[in-house]
């Protein structure tokens, strides 16, 4: 059976690569992915044959995997973080209808929500949701509804893709929506360049976050009503009685 491994490589390079993911990449004849993700793997897999496509050519990237797998090659498709969280796992399964002779196996990875939360403290230690502000594939009106619902439901919120060159005002717009339901003093935070050079974190309030400059490598954390700052760390309390 021809097979493709869809591999989540974590938010950075090799530091958060799981042993299962590492085995799949080591066994692969071909590693396919967005150039940035292949480069993040570093020298460990530098001798492997690779294939890549630019951003917004994800479908062609997936088709390369199917074509190569049909030729009997061991193929690994790499995605940043987890392939099933804003990654290519779903697209691969959608396309697989035309390739019934190819088996898919998703290998989970550490997503930015997990890795960023660990840096900031424990901001998603209770019910939480993840929302992307990228409107390339999701209409902005739907994103607005999801932000409204998350705030009204008192979830801790993780925001992916908060801003880019073409979407420089999206984070401010999102904060304005959340401020309809949440006080300005609500503890929040963000992590930049998780697992990469320049990694940093910042704890702030929702009011301060509204004026924060962010990019595609920034992950935002909005606290719920039980979130506090302890020793400079963001903590979503579970409700344990400790006194």
Image (cartoon, grey):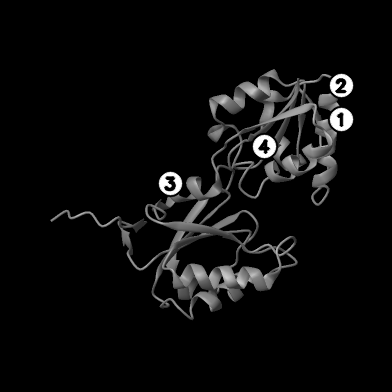
**Cα separation between marks 3 and 4:** 20 Å
The mark found on residue 71 in the picture is 2
State the image quarter where residue 237 is shown. Answer: bottom left
**Foreground of the two, 135 or 162:** 135
Q: Mark 3 or 2 closer to N-term?
A: 2
Residues tagged 3 and 2 counted as in contact (Cβ below 8 A): no
Q: Secondary structure at mark 1?
A: helix
Residues tagged 3 and 1 counted as in contact (Cβ below 8 A): no
Q: Residue furthest left?
A: 243
**Cα separation between marks 3 and 1:** 39 Å
- Where in the figure is residue 42, as x and y percent of width and height? 67, 31
Instruction: Provide the residue designation for mark 4.
Output: 40
At horizontal 54% and vertical 40% (from top left) the residue drawn is: 110
Q: Mark 3 or 1 closer to N-term?
A: 1
Residues tagged 1 and 2 counted as in contact (Cβ below 8 A): yes
Instruction: Provide the residue designation for mark 1.
Output: 67
State the image quarter where residue 71 is shown. Answer: top right
Q: Mark 1 or 4 closer to N-term?
A: 4
Disc 3 crowd rating (10 Å Cα; few below 14, some 14-19, many 20+) is: some
- Where in the figure is residue 85, as x and y percent of width and height? 61, 47
């Amino acid at each position: 059976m021809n097979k493709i491994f869809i591999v989540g490589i974590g938010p950075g390079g090799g530091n958060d690569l799981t042993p299962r993911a590492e085995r799949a990449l080591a066994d692969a004849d071909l590693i396919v992915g967005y150039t940035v993700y292949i480069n993040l793997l570093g020298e460990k897999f530098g001798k492997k044959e690779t294939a890549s496509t630019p951003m917004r050519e994800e479908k062609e990237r997936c088709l390369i995997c199917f074509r190569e797998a049909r030729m009997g090659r061991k193929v690994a498709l790499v995605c940043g973080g987890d392939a099933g969280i804003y990654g290519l796992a779903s697209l691969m399964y959608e396309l697989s209808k035309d390739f019934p002779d190819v088996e898919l196996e998703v290998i989970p990875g550490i997503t930015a929500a997990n890795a960023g939360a660990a840096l900031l403290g424990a901001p998603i230690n209770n019910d939480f949701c993840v929302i992307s502000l990228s409107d390339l594939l999701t209409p902005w009106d739907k994103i607005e509804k999801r932000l409204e619902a998350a705030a009204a439901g008192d979830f801790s919120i993780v925001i992916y893709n908060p801003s880019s060159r073409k979407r420089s005002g999206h984070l401010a717009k999102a904060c304005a929506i959340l401020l309809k339901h949440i006080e300005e003093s609500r503890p929040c935070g963000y992590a930049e360049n998780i697992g990469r050079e320049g990694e940093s974190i910042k704890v702030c309030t929702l009011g301060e976050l509204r004026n924060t400059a962010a990019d595609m490598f920034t992950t935002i954390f909005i606290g719920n009503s039980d979130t506090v700052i302890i020793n400079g760390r963001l903590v979503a309390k579970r409700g344990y009685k400790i006194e």
